Image (cartoon, rainbow, N blue to C red):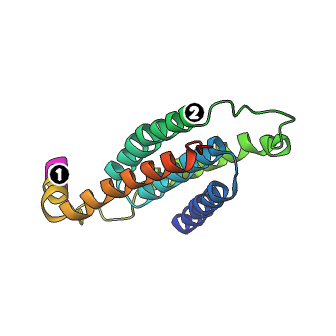
């Protein structure tokens, strides 16, 4: 029962942050919503018992890729400072209790485990080496396709953000 509650809370957080990413006009706010989305996807991986994928999601995507995106945004769109009153002031009151609630929910789900019996074998690769062999042998094409899609996204950002020649 708690796994269902955790899934629906994390899924709502993922969908809400994805909508925030698409609907915000400020690119920095969109990047922060993307970090929230990637973090909620990592938490979903944790609820599935895929600790390596969760760690890779946080380190690679929420860490390195987002630093690259924010750097590209800051370099390509200079002079875009925040001005005026903070439109999220009422929401900030809810941020700390909601964060504590999500942390407690995640800690509870992780403490309960995946529900598999103690002697049950893991369904996938059990070592990093086995995962690497699968990734670079059987799943090499999807892995490389993902890197090409990320490159295309970065080129698209550069083209959209450059100033038009007059």
Which secondary structure lies at badge 1? helix
Check the picture and name the quadrant holding the C terminus. Answer: top right
Residue visible at 54% across and 32% down? 75
Asked if residue 10 shows in the view, the reply is yes
Residues 14 and 102: in front is: 14
Q: Residue 55, position in %: x, y? A: 37, 44
Q: Which residue is mark 2?
A: 74
Circle nearer the viewer, 2 or 1 = 2
Which secondary structure lies at badge 2? helix
Q: Is 127 left, or right, of 42 in this rendering?
A: left
Q: Is 12 left, or right, of 92 in this rendering?
A: left
Measured in 3D between alpha carbons, the distance from the residue under mark 2 to the one under mark 1, in whole angstroms, is 35 Å
Check the picture and name the quadrant holding the N terminus. Answer: bottom right
Membership of 110 in magenta stretch: no
Q: Is residue 134 above or below residue 65?
A: below
Q: Earlier in the sequence, mark 2 or mark 1?
A: 2
Membership of 128 in magenta stretch: yes
Quadrant hosting residue 10: bottom right
Quadrant hosting residue 84: top right
Q: Is residue 117 above or below residue 113?
A: below
Q: Residues within 10 Å of mark 2 (few under 14, many from 20)?
A: some
Instruction: Give, as a single range, the part of the protein colored magenta.
Output: 125-129
Q: Which residue is mark 1?
A: 132
């Amino acid at each position: 029962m708690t796994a269902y509650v955790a899934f629906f809370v994390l899924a709502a957080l993922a969908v809400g942050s994805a909508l925030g990413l698409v609907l915000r006009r400020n690119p920095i706010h969109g990047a922060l919503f993307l970090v929230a989305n990637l973090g909620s996807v990592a938490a979903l991986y944790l609820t599935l018992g895929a600790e390596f994928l969760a760690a890779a999601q946080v380190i690679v995507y929420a860490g390195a890729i987002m630093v690259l995106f924010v750097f590209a945004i800051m370099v390509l769109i200079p002079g875009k400072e925040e001005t005026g009153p903070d439109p999220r002031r009422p929401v900030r009151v809810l941020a700390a209790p909601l964060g504590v609630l999500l942390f407690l929910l995640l800690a509870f789900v992780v403490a309960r485990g995946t529900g598999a019996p103690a002697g049950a074998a893991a369904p996938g690769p059990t070592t990093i080496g086995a995962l690497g062999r699968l990734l670079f042998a059987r799943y090499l094409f999807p892995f490389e396709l993902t890197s090409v899609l990320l490159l295309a996204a970065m080129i698209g950002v550069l083209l959209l953000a450059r100033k038009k020649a007059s």
